Image (tube, helix red, strand yellow):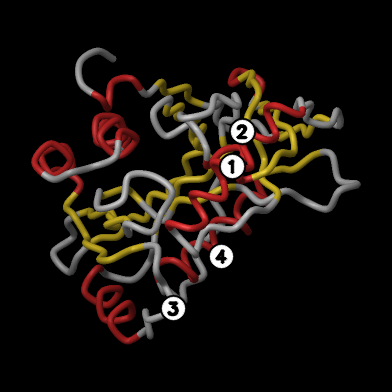
Amino acid sequence: MSGGAAHRCVWQPLRDGQALRIEIETDPVEESASEREATDGAWSRIRAANPRAFNGPILAYTSADPGANLVRCRRDEYRRLAVTPGIETGVVHLGVTGVLEARDEAGVPHVLMGLRSHATRIFGGMWELGPSGGVDPPPIDQRTMDADDLWRVLINEIREEVGLPVDPDPAPPIGLLHDPEGRSCELVVRVPLRRPVEELIALIDRENRTSRWEYDAVRWVALDDLDAFTRTQASIPTAAALAEILPRRA
């Protein structure tokens, strides 16, 4: 890929029919006293500006072997991600992006887009394919994760961020999308939904969204219109990159 911000993303397809394995390194993160002091100071300023920000454990991406469907990561802290790029900690968040797909009553395929709240860490006020979020670390004694673990994370995101009480069939990730600007590596999962778009819209409208702060709005966009949508609406780099990938896989 070449060109604008979206094209700085790097797409690595995963191998169909091969199990996903996420390996978690056991070595602790090393942080000098001066690095911790600078990070703590920046984190305090972030907390003062956005009371929703809170520190907690995350998985930080370190490397991958897409041909073997292998992703390596380590345990880290959200504060060390949040202070970038002002302080370079080297943290790249391991995330999952769900591409929710449904057809309208005329049979036209659509995907769900979410307008990110300004309270999010980055890209506030921009559209993304969603839901999207970090992969929560497993219990401390667990050193591997698989596609089932990833699916549970994604289902929680669908219910909590979007407000869709759906139970789709599990689907494996189709690839890794690296976003240097967002400091993330996203495992992308296509999620076909059985219900028509019109019914899904009604379901979202009926859900109480007052506690769902991540998205200010959601919109179903026809798959054929996705590329134009991401070019004319403020969209995050991964959304624009996926807009080029998905139509070829439809």
Instruction: Classify mark 3: helix, strand or loop.
Output: loop
Q: Residue at x 38, y 85 (%)?
A: 208
Q: Nearer the viewer, mark 1 or mark 3?
A: 1
Q: Earlier in the sequence, mark 3 or mark 2?
A: 2
Looking at the rendered image, the quarter that the N terminus falls into is: top left
* Mark 1 lies on residue: 41
Which label number is shown at residue 156? Answer: 4
Tag 1 near tag 4, CB within 8 Å: no
Q: Earlier in the sequence, mark 4 or mark 2?
A: 2
* Residue 94 appears in the rendering: yes
User: Looking at the image, which is closer to me, 132 or 152?
Assistant: 132
Quadrant position of residue 61: top right
Quadrant position of residue 209: bottom left
User: Looking at the image, which is closer to me, 172 or 219?
Assistant: 219
Query: Gap between marks 3 and 4, in whole Å?
Result: 14 Å
* Mark 3 lies on residue: 211
Q: Residue at x 52, y 42 (%)?
A: 82
Q: Residue at x 61, y 33 (%)?
A: 38
Q: Nearer the viewer, mark 4 or mark 2?
A: 2
Query: Gap between marks 1 and 3, in whole Å?
Result: 29 Å
Instruction: Classify mark 1: helix, strand or loop.
Output: helix
Query: Gap between marks 3 and 2, in whole Å?
Result: 33 Å
* Mark 2 lies on residue: 38
Q: Residues within 10 Å of mark 2 (few under 14, many from 20)?
A: few
